[in-house]
Image (spheres, rainbow, N blue to C red):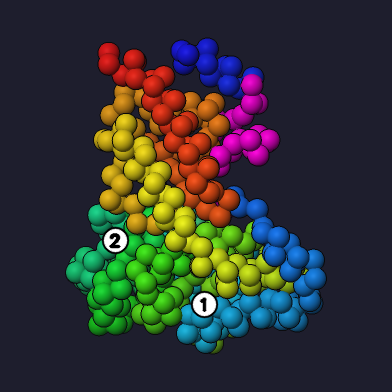
């Protein structure tokens, strides 16, 4: 099919928008690899939600929220945790508490905090970023040391270093624990605090075999999402010291997230926290198989050896067609993906089994076959 005609057909057929991320329902008929946030709650989660003990979390009286926060603190070996609606709010509250306005946060060049969240960081903590470019998003101790060298003009001040593990735009890459130790040492020497954006820290733990507490021990505070690979419908946890979390609870209300009987969701979150990590290795196997399958007919697009966790990026620029066309063609073949910085992004998750991977690969094969004749010119 030729592109202009085809795009019109697609809009007619599915009524979909091509903004990149969103499609108009029904999405049930698609294999959905746009994100690991798209999962449906498990039957156990739905049951737990139905029978959850609840109270007003604004007054600290929701037993299901309190249980979840205690479990998160215990699992990470930190003093306390705050259950918040999004990972972004965890990051922003942490940065608000660990920096002063107009000061700098060191992060990797494509980090979530300094990229997707940059506008929020301007609106809430009002900080600026010093971005360090690193291979696959993984900064080394020496790179951080360089970023922390004092400003010779004595104007710029770095208050905080953030690391992202796994690194989303790095392709779900895993920061090895010794490297985090090196970064923590540099931060300590410079009297700068260290924060971990661990949206997918459990994926990193599965890949390395480390316990989440081992990563947490290296940082002042961290965040992780229940709503991603762990499979909960809503929520993230900010974890740290007693004083920091007490302040975070205050900001939670100030920033408008003082939700009430949130135990309905926390009950599902507790199941995600205990059961979720047990099955993440399956997502990693599926991601690897997806990457290997695509590499069979598009060897330039994917290097399966770099797929460590549940994220696969395909660089389709050598096919002669841009990522948007690939995205649309894949959608027409029943596969939903996202486009990030000109690449096609796919994430495996709890609702993706080997059947879905087969279907995804056949969509890729179909589109590759359709586009191949054009590619030769
Ligand atoms: C998803 C994500 C976040 C933010 O989580 P939300 O719950 O979507 O706000 C932060 N950091 C990273 C690395 C993420 O992937």
Please, is residue 21 above or below residue 364 in the view? below
Residue 45 placement (x, y as % from top left): 69, 64
Classed neighbour count for the residue bearing mark 1: other residues with Cα under 10 Å, few (<14), some (14–19), many (≥20): many
Q: Quadrant of residue 50?
A: bottom right
Q: Does the rendering let one see residue 291?
A: yes
Asked whether 35 falls inside the magenta stretch, the response is yes
Q: Which quadrant of the figure has residue 149?
A: bottom left
Which secondary structure, mark 1? strand
The vertical placement of 52 against 139, above or below, is below
- Which residue corresponds to the image point at 62% horizontal and 62% vertical from the top-left? 232
x then y, percent, for residue 377:
27, 13
Q: Nearer the viewer, residue 176 or 29?
A: 29
Q: Write the residue at 59% across / 76% down.
A: 82
Q: Main secondary structure of the magenta part?
A: loop
Span of residues in magenta: 13-37
Residue at image coords 52%, 16%: 6
Q: Nearer the viewer, residue 287 or 95?
A: 287
Residue 357 circle label: none
Distance from Cα at disc 1 to Cα at disc 2: 22 Å
Residue underneath mark 1: 239
**Mark 1–mark 2 contact, CB under 8 Å?**
no
Which of the two discs, 1 and 2, labels the residue nearer the N terminus?
2
How packed is label 2: few (under 14 Cα within 10 Å), some, or many (20 or more)? many
Task: Say which of 153 and 331 sits in front.
Answer: 331
Residue 130 % position (x, y): 31, 61
Is residue 129 in view from this perspective? no
Circle 2 sits on which residue?
138
Please say whether residue 205 is one of the residues in the magenta stretch.
no
Say which residue appears at 53% left-offset and 28% top-offset: 333
Mark 2 lies on a secondary structure that is loop
């Amino acid at each position: 099919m030729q592109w202009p005609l085809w795009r019109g057909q697609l809009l007619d057929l599915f009524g979909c928008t091509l903004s990149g991320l969103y499609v108009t329902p029904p999405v049930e008929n698609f294999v959905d690899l746009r994100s690991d946030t798209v999962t449906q709650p498990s039957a156990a989660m739905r049951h737990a939600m139905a029978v959850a003990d609840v109270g007003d979390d604004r007054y600290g009286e929701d037993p299901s929220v309190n249980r979840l926060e205690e479990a998160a603190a215990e699992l990470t070996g930190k003093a306390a945790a705050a259950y918040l609606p999004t990972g972004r709010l965890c990051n922003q509250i942490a940065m608000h508490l660990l920096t002063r306005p107009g000061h700098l946060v060191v992060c990797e060049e494509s980090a979530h905090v300094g990229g997707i969240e940059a506008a929020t960081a301007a609106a809430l903590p009002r900080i600026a970023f010093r971005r360090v470019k690193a291979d696959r998003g993984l900064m080394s101790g020496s790179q951080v040391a360089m970023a922390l060298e004092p400003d010779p003009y004595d104007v710029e001040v770095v208050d905080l270093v953030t690391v992202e593990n796994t690194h989303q735009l790095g392709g779900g890459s895993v920061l090895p624990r010794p490297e985090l130790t090196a970064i923590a040492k540099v931060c300590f020497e410079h009297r700068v605090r260290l924060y971990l954006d661990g949206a997918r820290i459990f994926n990193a733990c599965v890949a390395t075999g480390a316990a989440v507490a081992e990563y947490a021990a290296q940082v002042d505070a961290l965040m992780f999402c229940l709503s991603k690979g762990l499979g909960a419908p809503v929520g993230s946890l900010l974890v740290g010291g007693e004083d920091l979390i007490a302040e975070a609870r205050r900001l939670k209300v100030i920033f408008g997230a003082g939700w009430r009987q949130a135990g309905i969701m926390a009950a599902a979150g507790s199941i995600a926290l205990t059961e979720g990590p047990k099955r993440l290795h399956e997502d990693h196997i599926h991601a690897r198989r997806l990457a290997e399958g695509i590499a069979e007919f598009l060897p330039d697009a994917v290097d399966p050896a770099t797929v460590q966790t549940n994220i696969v990026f395909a660089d389709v620029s050598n096919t002669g067609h841009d990522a948007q066309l690939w995205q649309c063609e894949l959608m027409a073949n029943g596969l939903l993906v996202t486009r990030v910085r000109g690449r096609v992004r796919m994430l495996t998750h709890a609702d993706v089994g080997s059947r879905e991977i087969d279907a995804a690969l056949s969509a890729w094969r179909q589109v590759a076959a359709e586009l191949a004749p054009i590619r030769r010119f």
